[in-house]
Image (cartoon, rainbow, N blue to C red):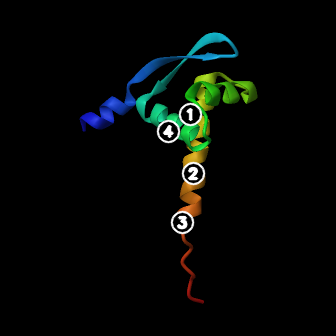
Amino acid sequence: MPEIIRSEEVKKRSVTIAGHRTSFSLEEAFWLEVKKLAKDQGLSINQFIEKVDEARTSNLSSTLRILVLKNLQNQLQSTTVSIPQDS
């Protein structure tokens, strides 16, 4: 149970993008997934956040959470196997 509680704590994160410091708030579970996404794309966390920042249309924290959610949904879809139904 402590791991679940720890992953729900919101923590303020700071990065440098486009030459200036910016901050956003994310739960630990989302932060770990954001770091994985950056690594998977071969980008530093600052580069990844800058890329997201340039494309976003809402606040940065929400955009990062939605990005993580969509990525995990895509992973789930690609690993889900359909079981044929008997007719």
Q: Quadrant of the N terminus?
A: top left
> Label 2, label 4: how many angstroms apart (C-alpha)?
13 Å
- State the residue position of label 4: 33
Residue 85 or 35: which is nearer the viewer? 35
> Label 4, label 3: how many angstroms apart (C-alpha)?
20 Å
> Label 2, label 3: how many angstroms apart (C-alpha)?
10 Å
Q: Which mark is residue 75?
A: none
Q: Does residue 16 appear left or right of residue 7 in this picture?
A: right
Q: How crowded is mark 3: few (under 14 residues within 10 Å), some or many (20 or more)?
A: few
In this rendering, which labeled residue sits more in front, label 2 or label 4?
A: 4
Q: Residue 73 carries which label?
A: 2
Q: Which mark is residue 80?
A: 3
> Label 4, label 1: how many angstroms apart (C-alpha)?
9 Å
Tags 3 and 1 touching, CB below 8 Å: no
* Residue in the image at 56% along x and 33% along y: 65
Q: How crowded is mark 2: few (under 14 residues within 10 Å), some or many (20 or more)?
A: few
Residue 86 or 47: which is nearer the viewer? 47
Secondary structure state at the residue bearing disc 2:
helix
In this rendering, which labeled residue sits more in front, label 4 or label 1?
A: 4
Secondary structure state at the residue bearing disc 3:
loop
In this rendering, which labeled residue sits more in front, label 4 or label 3?
A: 4
